[in-house]
Amino acid sequence: MNYTDKLLEVRDLHKSYAKGGIPTKALNGITFDVLPGEFLGIMGASGSGKTTLLNCIATIIKPTSGQILLSGTNISAFGSDELAMYRGSKIGYLFQDFALLDNLTGRENILLPLSIHDADVRLSEKKLNSIAEFLKITDVLSKFPSQMSGGQKQRVAAARCLISDPDIILADEPTGALDTKAARLLMEKLQEINRAKNRTIMMVTHDPNAASFCSRILFIQDGKIFHELRRQIPSETRDEFYDRILRVMAQMGGGSANVL
Amino acid sequence: MFFNLAWRNAKRSRNENLIYFLTMVTAVASFYIILSLGQQDVIRFLRELESSAVEKLLTTVMPMVYLCALLFIFFLVVFANKYQLECRSRELGLYLMFGMKKKRLFFQLMMEGFITSLLALFGGIICGSFLSEIISLATARLVGQGIITHQSSFSIGAVIWTTIGLLLIQALSLFILGGKTFKREVHQLLYGEMVKKQNTGTASGGLFTLLVGVILLAVAYWVALKHFFAAGGAMLFVAVLFGIAGTLLFIRGLARLLSLFAGSIKNKSTKGLYTFTLRQLQENVVCKYVSISVASLLMMFTIMLIADGSSSIMTYRKNLSRGSSVYDFTVMGDDMMVEQYLSSEKMKPYVAHLNRMETGKIKKPEAGSINSFVDWSKFRAEIVQHLPSDVVDPATQDTGSYTMAPDNPPALNILGIIDTGSYTPYLVPASTYSRLLEASGETPLILGEDEAVFYINPDFIGSAQEDESSMLDEIFSKAKSTNTPLLSIDGKPFFFTSSVTMKGLTADKNIRVTSALIVSDEVFEKYVDQDTCMVYWHFCIPGETANEKGLMKSIMDANHLLKPSGFVYESYLNNFGRQLFYVIAGSYTSLYMGFMFLIIACALLSLQFLTQMQATKERYLTLSMLGANHKQMKKSINKQVLWYFLLPLLLACISGSVGLFAMQKHLHSSQAAIVQSYPLMFIMAGSVIVVLVIYAVAVAQTANREIGKLKWKINS
């Protein structure tokens, strides 16, 4: 991994909502980098600004000021065509509620980003099969979302993320709507995607268990980065990392002593 | 505060839901048009002439049409309101969360409905009166022959009844829907219904349904075409039932088959939003197949009613022409009194070419001798020779039935005329017919003792009469040149005189002598059966009076003068009025119901599509997140709307064509009239397409606007 190449650079990002009343600052000058192949977790209490941050990177909302550079390109300056291209091919977004189109089969859902960009059929079929096998969803490809379990749905959604070979996968509470078993299976798969396939993942989560699969975690409070944790790979086990996460979370809840 | 909120909400509803508002305006306009019918120029004119028939139309038929319209519009308003409430479900939930009482919220909804209704009434009555005025002018122009004067058709009564009708159905629909809405949990109102499971069924099931649908439709078409009147109309009922069932199954089956397309066309499935569009369409059609089938059936009725209405206007319009009648008035009554009255000073300016015409049937021979004084056999044999080789003489057939129509070979029509009245034909004295010819500006008729004219009423057979005349002229000339008399009366030979102009004998087409023998006055006196004699006094409006006042005005004036006389009389105008009444009663209702059905079908489709769109709009957000641009989504929506409208329309076109063909075949005999009505039919078809396009464009724009709103929001 070449650590000198930054995949994502977030520079002094501000976002305030000011509809009619006093402006509320959701992001208050956040700066950080994401390196290729990282599995970055974003944690924080409700209203801390973590989802706003992810949505700014996903171009769902526009930041008030600051820059977001993906592979050196400023995405804040994109026009609508560039945005469509960016969303379809540079990023993959994993939603908490899966956001599968319920009138499309699993296969059709997965192929959708490719078809939007008029991709080659034979190549996409091949790719689809290998991803489906990897995520263990081959048997639900011809089913509609209403015929799948929550875990299957989220893995189909993950396959949809992967199919267009995005530079970065953005995941917003991907385990939020899953039971423990399905959540664990999904996180293992995400970790495998990250490690074996060398995909960069940025995940917002509440869940310390899910976060323990990450390689680095940014804690956000009041729209700012409050703390950062790095997992010592391979020396630190996931359980040890989990304990450290819990300690920071306790600290953030109590908000007193120095956690470092 | 309460009123302000209701006012603002109503305003927002109008802006955001144009289709809802348009539907209400259309409803009002259609009510107004039907209710103001009595004020239309043509109807006002007819009231003077055919008052009892017009009153019957206005007091029995039109209220029924109004009630039907009310019922249809009620369903439409329920639908429009349902869509409106579904769009506002979250807002209603919030009001309840804020502690608003259900009763108060219900009144607020009612108030909003009331405000919207009042505005729709305003717009609808303006549109309705404008349309009514156009219809009034157009019909007066089209069929009025320049005698129907134009007056404003605005009717206060129509406004009042329209207002009552609309407010009633609006209140009723909100009452029903409001009750339903408030029965739902607040959570359901806030976060919507659970997404329906995808019940798309299997492809083979779809194929089977489609196949059954096609078979049922084919049976319905076959019954309609081949057995229209069989079993006392029961078969027609079977055709209708099979048609409805077939349409339902066809559309349901077709929708399910769309999933086959979605999965099978590999290279297309990864192009743009092809699969998505197909799936959306499939879901829309599968979920709402009943509504789409109903829309398709309504469109079919539209096609049939509008085509039928147009053709009946054109068919009857032909009858409205002066035709062959020479006289403007025919009066019957005591000879002396009629003559005295018609020669009086007050009538003088209106009477010219007064002609006493006596007609009667020929006497029957004494019992025991021959059947009839008239021997047609030679004439008949001559006509039979002129029959085309593929047509058999009907007298040689067992049934011996005759049909006389413009499309028939002329010889066949003449055989029919001879055979149906050959024993006791009408006799007309030559002198009276001669005066008639004089009145029409033709050369008078002079008949010798051994001459007769074979008279056929020119309006009887219709447009093909020229063929008959030229054939008869040829036969008569040939007989004369070879000195072969073709007719004998009481054993005495008679020659037919050729090239005599045929004119209608009376002013009114309804007193028709279809065929007669015109003979010299002496022969008439000798052979006429006095018991069957009828005396008519005919006269024309003098040219100078007609020039001064206009023919129709003069006829109307003379009409008023004759009224107190107590005589039985008919005028050309009565005839005109009667025919006109057929046009109006026949075509007006058909056209009105046709357009009504069309509007309902369009509004039904539009609201269904938008309701579904509202329920699934989050999908477009996902698409946007996956990189679909607005242009792609717009294209997808436009395609969905196009096919959503085309699918029922295509089936309606097929069924409608079959229905029209069956109607033409079994109900209308004249092909010529149908051909004549093509220009009007094209105009009507154009209007139907315009209405469809307006609705489809409105739906596509509303749907596109909904997507535009989603652009930067999530979970909104």
Image (cartoon, coloured by chain):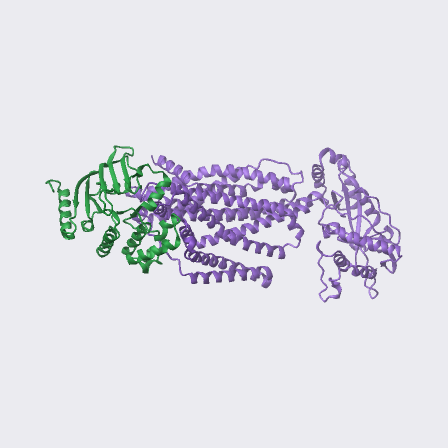
Q: Nearer the viewer, residue B532 or B481?
A: B481
Visual hue assigned to chain A:
green
Q: Is residue A25 above or below residue B640?
A: above
* Quarter of image, res B145: top right
Q: Nearer the viewer, residue B189 or B69?
A: B189
The quadrant of the image that shows the C terminus of chain B is top left
Number of callouts: 0
* Quarter of image, res B557: top right
Horizontally, residue A238 falls left or right of residue B451, namely left
Q: Which chain is purple?
A: B
Q: Nearer the viewer, residue A134 or B694?
A: A134
Horizontally, residue A214 falls left or right of residue B348, namely left
Residue in view at x 86 percent, y 56 percent: B479
Q: Nearer the viewer, residue B628 or A146?
A: B628
Is residue A154 among what the camera can see? Answer: yes
The quadrant of the image that shows the N terminus of chain B is top left
Residue B477 % position (x, y): 85, 53
Horizontally, residue B491 falls left or right of residue B462, namely right
Residue A84 % position (x, y): 36, 43
* Quarter of image, res B703: top left
Specify the farthest residue to the left: A257
Is residue B176 among what the camera can see? Answer: no
Residue B86 % position (x, y): 37, 46
Residue A145 % position (x, y): 33, 55
